[in-house]
Amino acid sequence: MVSETAGAAPLIEVDGLEKVFSVRRKAGRLRRVRQEVRAVDGISFGVPRGEMVGFIGPNGAGKSTTIKMLTGILVPSGGRLRIAGIDPSPGAGLRAGRDRGRTRLARRIGVVFGQRTTLWWDLPLKDSYELVRRMYRVPDAVYRANLARCVELLDLGPLLAVPVRQLSLGQRMRGDLAAALLHDPEVLYLDEPTIGLDVVSKAKVRGFLREVNAERGTTVLLTTHDLTDIEQLCRRVMVIDHGRLVYDGGLDGLRAAGGGERTLVVDLERQLPPIEGVPGARTVKVDGPRQWLAFPASQSAAPVVAAVAARYPLVDLSVREPDIETLIAELYASGGKQGEAGQRGPAL
Ligand SMILES: Nc1ncnc2c1ncn2[C@@H]1O[C@H](COP(=O)(O)OP(=O)(O)OP(=O)(O)O)[C@@H](O)[C@H]1O
């Protein structure tokens, strides 16, 4: 799978990647024993240049450990990886070589963690950007063009003079996204970029990512617990569980393999009896004027919405995705039904 010919090879190549942590656990009152945690247990995948891929899984599945290996922060215990032709960890004992690989890689990738900022807390946003420019030695013209485009797309103009600690979570996330892109990375790793954001901020972040991907062809690996992020941004999704890749294919295929349900949440003008007669959907909950209708996750929401809208006085409605934990539990329960993507289907 890992090819030496840079031109034809995927931008991200991962082959049999492993990470084993050695931890000391209590065994009795005084005794401690060494135990191995196989955080990543032999995963392989390739991501072509320009693709946006969702990388999802339950808590503790191995997502962050994988991303840390892909950025060169962690050294793998086994397997191979190559990003833009660079191996950040060519082998134990080659310390100088590894660091050179890491440094070269740092210039080609951008990373955004939803839970932490990479910006300087006490500095105005624009000073943080200036530091990023110097750190990556971004040429002046490139820096100015990239900053101007990010400011425009992310509405950062009024925020540039504001210290990061005074920004709201959504504003800070927009600030972080710009910082990650100033040096023109080919690959962007996003770890929960919409976590904790309100609906408007989420839409802004997603719109920006779509734009960046289309405009610059940036390859994006997106970790999220929000399936709407995946639905709106990624044609392909990889699911990791217990350190193994259990699915690699389209989101529809994942829904079909899981057999899960989505929910249409309907706000009516007034309290009414449970909604009936909507083909393919059933009302599962009523609370005052709000009602919840479940329908198969593999089915489009459009006919359900149309059928409800035609017969009931609506104030608002929204579609809720099954959460990722539910989807993965269902994927296992279904016993590895084939996904849509042939060899990319569930590998349970
Ligand atoms: N430095 C470490 N030392 C020991 N064990 C670790 C270390 N980092 C991660 N682990 C373990 O490896 C496994 C995978 O953790 P990881 O953080 O990669 O999961 P995750 O999918 O990112 O989870 P989350 O969604 O909660 O962030 C877990 O069992 C975790 O406890």
Image (cartoon, grey):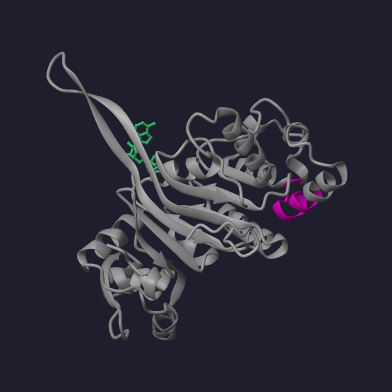
301 vs 347: above or below? below
Residue 220, can we see it? yes
Q: Which residues lie in the magenta part?
A: 148-156
Q: Which of 342 and 300 is in front in this view?
A: 342
Which residue is depicted at the point 28% across and 67% down? 286
Which residue is depicted at the point 29% across and 27% down? 23
Which residue is depicted at the point 66% across and 46% down? 108
Q: In the picture provided, is 235 more to the left or to the right than 127? A: left
Q: In the picture provided, is 346 more to the left or to the right than 129? A: left
Q: Where residue 81 sits: x, y (%)?
A: 50, 49
Which residue is depicted at the point 49% across and 36% down? 91
5 vs 296: above or below? above
Q: In the picture provided, is 170 more to the left or to the right than 316? A: right
Q: Nearer the viewer, residue 268 or 150?
A: 150
Q: Where residue 216 sits: x, y (%)?
A: 71, 60
Q: Main secondary structure of the magenta part?
A: helix
Q: Point out the residue furthest to the top here.
A: 30
Q: In the picture provided, is 299 more to the left or to the right than 329? A: right
Which image quadrant: the C terminus? bottom left
Count of picture labels: 0
300 vs 153: above or below? below
Within the magenta stretch, is there residue 138? no
Q: Point out the residue furthest to the right here.
A: 141
Ligand 1, what quadrant? top left
Residue 264, can we see it? no
Q: Where residue 204 sits: x, y (%)?
A: 62, 56
Residue 27 sits in which quadrant? top left
Within the magenta stretch, is there residue 150? yes
Q: Where residue 344 sits: x, y (%)?
A: 40, 69
